[in-house]
Image (spheres, rainbow, N blue to C red):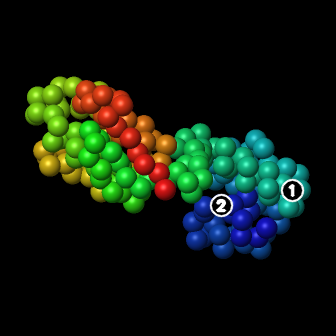
Amino acid sequence: MLHTLGNLTIVTQDWNSQLSNSSYDVKREKLAKHGLLLNQRYFGEFAPEIWNGKTIRKRAQWLMAMITEIWPQLGETTGSWEEKPKAVIILDEVYPVKSWRDVLRRTADFVVDWSDKEQFEQEIVAALPSYIVREPPNDKYYQLANGWWIYINLNAVTLKQFSTDLIEAAGIPEDEYDVELW
C-alpha cells in the first residue's frame, strides 16, 4: 500500500523530509494544517485514528470522489474497446479516424466547410462558446481552417457530445451523421 494513491500526498521537499519518518499522529496533525486544501480537509475532518491498509483504501476512495467532483470528466468511463471509433460519416462521406479527438477534428473541419462565416460565428460559436474561441489560451486547442480554435482536451464522452452538438448547430440532419466503431 506504500505507493498507492491513498497513502500519498503532495507536499514540499522540506515537508516531505520533516514528515517522512514521523509517526502517523504527527503527520495527521501537520497535514491538517497544510496549505493544500485536500490535505487540510481530509486530515482535519476525516482522518482515522489508525493508519492501515483499510484506511489507506478509504482515503483513496475519498480522494477519487474529491478529484471527480473537481474534474467530473475524469470520472466518466469511455466504455469498452469496442467503442473505439473507426470512421466518421457525414453526408455519405467517410473520414477514417483513430480516436475520439479525430472524430471531433473531422466533424469540426466538415462543419467549417459546410457553413459560411456568418452562420459559423452567429450560430455555431454562439451555441458552443465554451469550446470555440478566437484565441486559444493554451495548447489544448485545434485550429480550424477559418481561424477559430476548438477545445479538444476532453474525455471520450464529452468529445462525442461536442461532435454531435457541432452537427446540430450547423443544421446537418442527425441521420446524416454517424460514427463507425471497430
What is the spatial separation of the Cα atoms under label 2 and label 1, in whole angstroms? 17 Å
The three-letter amino acid code for the residue at tag 1 is: Lys
| Residue tagged 1 | 54
Percent of width and height locating residue 167: 30, 34
Task: Answer left or right for 24 relative to 61.
Answer: right
Residue furthest front in the image: 92
- Res 37 seen here: no
The secondary element bearing badge 1 is classed as helix
Please name whichever residue, 68 or 165, is drawn nearer the observer in this view of the structure.
Answer: 165
Q: Residue at x 85, y 61 (%)?
A: 53
N-terminal of the pair, mark 2 or mark 1, is: 2
The secondary element bearing badge 2 is classed as loop
Q: Residue at x 15, y 28 (%)?
A: 119
Locate the N terminus by quadrant. bottom right
Badge number at residue 3: none
The three-letter amino acid code for the residue at tag 2 is: Thr
Q: Residue at x 79, y 51 (%)?
A: 58
- Dot 1 crowding, Cα within 10 Å, few <14, some 14–19, many 20+: few
Disc number lying in front (2 or 1) = 1
- Dot 2 crowding, Cα within 10 Å, few <14, some 14–19, many 20+: few
Percent of width and height locating residue 156: 47, 48
95 vs 116: above or below: below
Please name whichever residue, 18 or 118, is drawn nearer the observer in this view of the structure.
Answer: 118
Please name whichever residue, 109 or 52, is drawn nearer the observer in this view of the structure.
Answer: 109
Percent of width and height locating residue 179: 40, 45
- Res 95 seen here: yes
Percent of width and height locating residue 129: 29, 32
Which quadrant would residue 111 be assigned to in this image? top left
Which quadrant would residue 107 be assigned to in this image? top left
Q: Residue at x 36, y 57 (%)?
A: 97
| Residue tagged 2 | 9
